[in-house]
């Protein structure tokens, strides 16, 4: 058509005819520019999507607001333990893995995922955890003085237990293990018990 112009606003192509419509398109463009940073802030608080390295995953966990979800969009290889110390959900989307590429160096680096001091509840679900083999000397998940929900996990190739609960409360369902050296799914430790 003659006199028809196409304008692209946030990925949408808008065609207008005449000057009145150009004013409307200009206002829409200004609104989109002003609102986009605000939308981006809200979206980042709701969920973070990550894949690749432990640095990216740990950064997503650390920067996520309590109560939010970090969703894997690909496999992640860890150079050190993933540490969780807040109410958050880590979701592997049912098909992605977290693999350890490090060796145990102490209690703060003794598992693929460590959950420490979470007063509410941390949730880990829909993930394949790989401890990297017996030589790495790792637990799958170590939970210390925390509340945790573990659901639909495969934990494999760990030198230690698949799940260790230490002074913690856990809800555990749909856990599959493969090639865990201790041949245990979990261990429980209870401290400061007073018997009367």
Image (cartoon, rainbow, N blue to C red):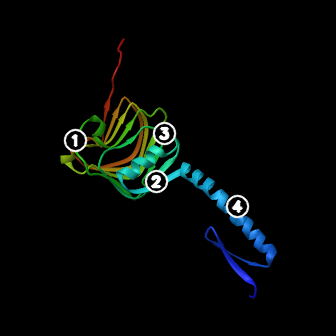
Tag 2 residue:
71
Q: Nearer the viewer, mark 3 or mark 1?
A: 3
Q: Which mark is residue 83?
A: none
Q: Which mark is residue 87?
A: 3
Q: Which mark is residue 31?
A: 4
Question: Callout 3: helix, strand or loop?
Answer: loop
Please name the residue shown 35% across and 20% down the image.
192
Q: Neighbour class for label 1 at 10 Å: few (<14), some, many (≥20)?
A: some
Disc with the residue nearer the chain's start (3 vs 1): 3
Please name the residue shown 53% across and 42% down the image.
67
Please name the residue shown 37% across and 41% down the image.
83
Residue lying at the far top in this picture: please name it: 196
Disc with the residue nearer the chain's start (1 vs 4): 4
Residue lying at the far left in this picture: please name it: 135
Q: Nearer the viewer, mark 2 or mark 1?
A: 2
Q: Neighbour class for label 4 at 10 Å: few (<14), some, many (≥20)?
A: few
Q: Is residue 74 above or below residue 159?
A: below
């Amino acid at each position: 058509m003659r006199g028809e112009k196409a304008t692209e606003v946030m990925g949408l192509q808008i065609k207008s005819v005449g000057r009145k419509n150009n004013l409307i398109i200009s206002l829409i463009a200004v609104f989109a520019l002003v609102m986009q940073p605000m939308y981006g802030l809200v979206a980042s608080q709701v969920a973070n999507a990550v894949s690749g390295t432990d640095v990216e995953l740990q950064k997503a966990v650390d920067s996520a607001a309590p109560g939010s979800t970090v969703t894997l969009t690909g496999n992640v290889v860890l150079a050190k333990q993933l540490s969780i110390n807040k109410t958050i959900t880590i979701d592997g989307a049912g098909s992605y893995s977290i693999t350890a590429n490090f060796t145990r160096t102490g209690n703060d680096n003794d598992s693929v995922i460590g959950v420490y001091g979470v007063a509410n509840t941390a949730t880990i679900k829909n993930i394949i955890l790989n401890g990297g083999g017996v030589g790495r000397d790792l637990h799958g998940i170590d939970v210390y003085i925390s509340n945790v929900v573990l659901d639909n996990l495969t934990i494999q190739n760990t030198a230690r237990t698949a799940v260790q609960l230490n002074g913690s409360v856990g809800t555990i369902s749909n856990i599959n293990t493969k090639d865990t050296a201790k041949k245990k799914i979990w261990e429980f430790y209870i401290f400061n018990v007073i018997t009367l």
